[in-house]
Image (cartoon, rainbow, N blue to C red):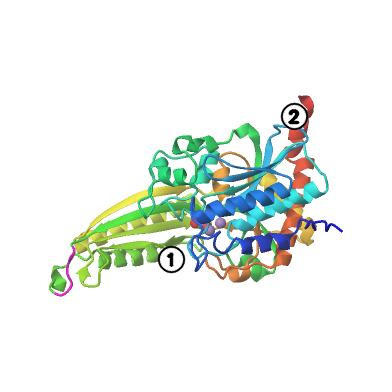
Amino acid sequence: MVKMPVRETASGPRAVVRCDDLGVAPYSDSDDYLFRPYLGAGHAATLDRIAAWMTEAGMTARVDAAGNIVGRYEGRHPDAPALVIGSHVDSVRDGGRYDGMLGVMLGIETVAWFAERGHRFAFAIEVVGFGDEEGSRFPVSMLATRAVAGVLGDQDLALVDAAGVGLAEALDGFGLDVARFADAGRKREDILAYVEAHIEQGPVLEAEGHALGVVSAIAAQYRFRAVVTGVAGHAGTMAMRLRHDALAAAAEMVLAVERIGGAGPEDLVATVGRMEVGPGVPNVVPGAVTFSIDIRAGVDAVRDRAAEAIQAALPEIAARRGVGLDLTLQQDLPATPCDSGLSALMADAVSEVTGAAPRVLVSGAGHDAMVMARLAPVSMLFLRCRGGISHNPAEAVEAEDVQVALEAMTAFVIRFEQTGAGAGAALTQEER
Ligand code: GLV
Ligand code: MN
Ligand code: MN
């Protein structure tokens, strides 16, 4: 007798298992930990796997001109505008398995849930796995997301990674053409709304006993690059009083960044997360140091005041120590409110499945939704994660929470069909 393949049904636990599957090589560029940078070999292998899952869930799958994977579940009419559900597939170095990927997997499960029931909408549903949210390859983040939203900066196409590989070369290795990068841009009229499910990456939901939360806004971010230029010299012969040690100066600057970040309200944070020391040799006084500064706050004004204080403090340290300093703003992402109407639908969906009013919170972490908000109204659903730990291999979620999140996502889509912009799309279709 021929054995029929068992068709698994849509579920939150399946989304978790899939994230776990994608947490190791060949879906990671490292054999030792998860690192899936934009346009790497792990990224390519991951897109093949996701395309198969999207197809199985009833979608057509394609990779766009910026390396994002896009699955489309058609509406009742071809060319209908889409409700986009997305998050990112890239990871930080030695990252967790759920940051970003869980939102993409939940998008696929949401579509699978409706496809299994034969339910089509007046609108299409698209599931997008953005290629670069973290900025873990090039010096700025959300490159592929910005291509979709049509908000690329002048310098973006000329970006070069730490190994000296330019965006054009990296795209070429992925079978893509930098000259067509902006073709990933979507038309405003084709996107009704953007919804993203993501782990909280913080401790609030767990501490307060909530499986889910609704995001009211995403914090503002700045990314700066600081280059400190001292004088390299012999570590054995250069007298201490004569040194212009770039690393000692940079160390004092790091402490200034920490002090300024800690002197504001609770939501203000400032981080130096990356530093390169030149020449980086034990018996040479460091001559050059490059480091990153990441500044965030719930509102632009608080972030901006901290940035001004840092821009005043660092040159003072450089002058006192006789080193050069070049500070460049690399990225400016303003604080992004989520759409109040969509968030109300999401809050109702969460109340329906959990039986309690949702915890509403501001996201300190950046998300693709910040950029997609330039194109369409956005809403975000947060899931509790263990210990609030993220950007760390210890990142963990409970499968039961992910099941509840899937139920909230499906409840949201039904509400969107009945009362949201989706109902508007139905009207538009009938008028055609
Ligand atoms: C991404 O995770 C960010 O918040 O930088
Ligand atoms: Mn992240
Ligand atoms: Mn993320």
Compared to residue 251, the image places residue 408 above or below, namely above
Would residue 58 be seen by someone viewing this image from the given angle? yes
Seen from the viewer's position, the closer of residues 291 and 127 is 127
Query: Is residue 298 in view?
Result: no
Q: Which residue in the structure is indicated by mark 1?
A: 262
**Which mark is first along the chain, 2 or 1?**
1
| Left or right relative to 280: residue 306 | right
Cα separation between marks 1 and 2:
51 Å
Judged by its main secondary structure, the magenta piece is: loop
On the picture, is 247 further left or further right than 215?
left
Q: Which mark is residue 428?
A: 2
**What is the x, y in percent for residue 170?**
44, 47
Give the residue type at disc 2: Thr
Front label number (1 vs 2): 2
On the image, the x and y values in percent for residue 23 come to: 58, 63
Residue in view at x 43 percent, y 61 percent:
270
| Relative to 315, 128 lies left or right | right
Q: Is residue 107 rendered to the left or right of residue 129?
A: right
Query: What span is colored magenta in the figure?
Result: 232-236
**Compared with residue 155, is residue 261 higher up or lower down, i.e. above or below?**
below
Of 310 and 224, nearer the camera is 224
